[in-house]
Image (tube, helix red, strand yellow):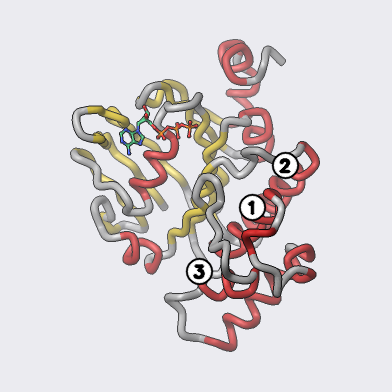
Amino acid sequence: MLKVDQIDVFYGNIQALKGVSLEVNEGEIVTLIGANGAGKSTLLKTLSGLIKPKNGFIQYLGDSIGGKPAQAIVKAGISQVPEGRRVFANMTVEENLELGAFLRKDSKEIHKDIQKVYETFPRLLERRKQLSGTLSGGEQQMLAMGRAVMARPKLLLLDEPSMGLAPLMVKTIFQIIEDINRNGTTILLVEQNAHMALSIANRAYVIETGRVTVSGTAAELQASEEIKKAYLGGH
Ligand code: ATP
């Protein structure tokens, strides 16, 4: 579905991604794990068209999308839930969900999808008229995910959904990621919480200072002594 081939990304003179290659197949949950500053967010921003790669190719469903504008990429079926969730604070929960569907014109279907989001996240239904800026961190994460799903993505990019959440909320969010995947959405999940990410992923890539250093099935990475030491707190 997605094939990233040897991409280089720069911020001025600083090279944030160095020849990164990876693949995501339809139906998979693939996770990208790595420490702070490794280049995880940069990769997602490049995939969603916010940054242009200097070299390399990005293929999505057979088309080259490297350097295409962000709106064209959303239209093609890729949605991103950004790090730090960034909901529109001065809009209600429901207005945020409607915005997620801004490229769609099928208002009946949009309404149905909003109801589906409420089924997935009953907490958002209770708070549909509440200003989003007053939601808790976990609720904002739910809203950011709900908003992304409203675009009916084929591929969902998640940037550290567990960040800053209490353990119970992390568990809930990961269960929902699995549900979204079961309902037909392919997922690329960027996480620092390698333990949780590997527990739901099919395959994984490790990124260190801009390079992919390890890749394999989630089970292989969970069993690797090196990965255990570096990313799983020795467990
Ligand atoms: P974290 O887990 O801390 O979010 P990350 O793996 O997502 O880290 P990136 O945000 O992709 O890392 O950053 C990769 C590198 O690029 C870092 O060294 C960072 O300082 C640098 N970088 C990121 N954004 C910019 C920018 N706008 N200008 C210059 N350098 C940047």
Q: Which mark is on residue 141?
A: 1
Tell me which corner region of the image, top left, top right, bottom left or bottom right, holds residue 196.
top right
Which amino acid type is marked by label 2?
Val
Mark 1, Cα crowd under 10 Å, few <14 / some 14-19 / many 20+, is many
Q: Tell me the element at label 3.
A: loop
Which amino acid type is marked by label 1?
Gln
Distance from label 3 to label 2 (Cα)? 23 Å
Quarter of the image with the C terminus is top right
User: Residue placed at 50% from the left, 74% from the top?
Assistant: 101
Mark 3, Cα crowd under 10 Å, few <14 / some 14-19 / many 20+, is many
Confirm if mark 1 falls within 8 A of ligand 1. no
Residue 98: image location, x then y, percent: 56, 75
Distance from label 1 to label 2 (Cα)? 10 Å
Q: Earlier in the sequence, mark 3 or mark 2?
A: 3
The mark lying in front, picked from 3 and 2, is 2
User: Residue placed at 20% from the left, 34% from the top?
Assistant: 12
Residue 42: image location, x then y, percent: 37, 39
Q: Which residue in the protein does label 3 denote?
A: 151
Which amino acid type is marked by label 3?
Ala
User: Residue placed at 48% from the left, 56% from the top?
Assistant: 155
The mark lying in front, picked from 1 and 3, is 1
**Above/below status of 60 relative to 233:** below
Q: Tell me the element at label 2.
A: helix
Q: Which residue in the protein does label 2 denote?
A: 170
Tell me which corner region of the image, top left, top right, bottom left or bottom right, holds residue 129.
bottom right
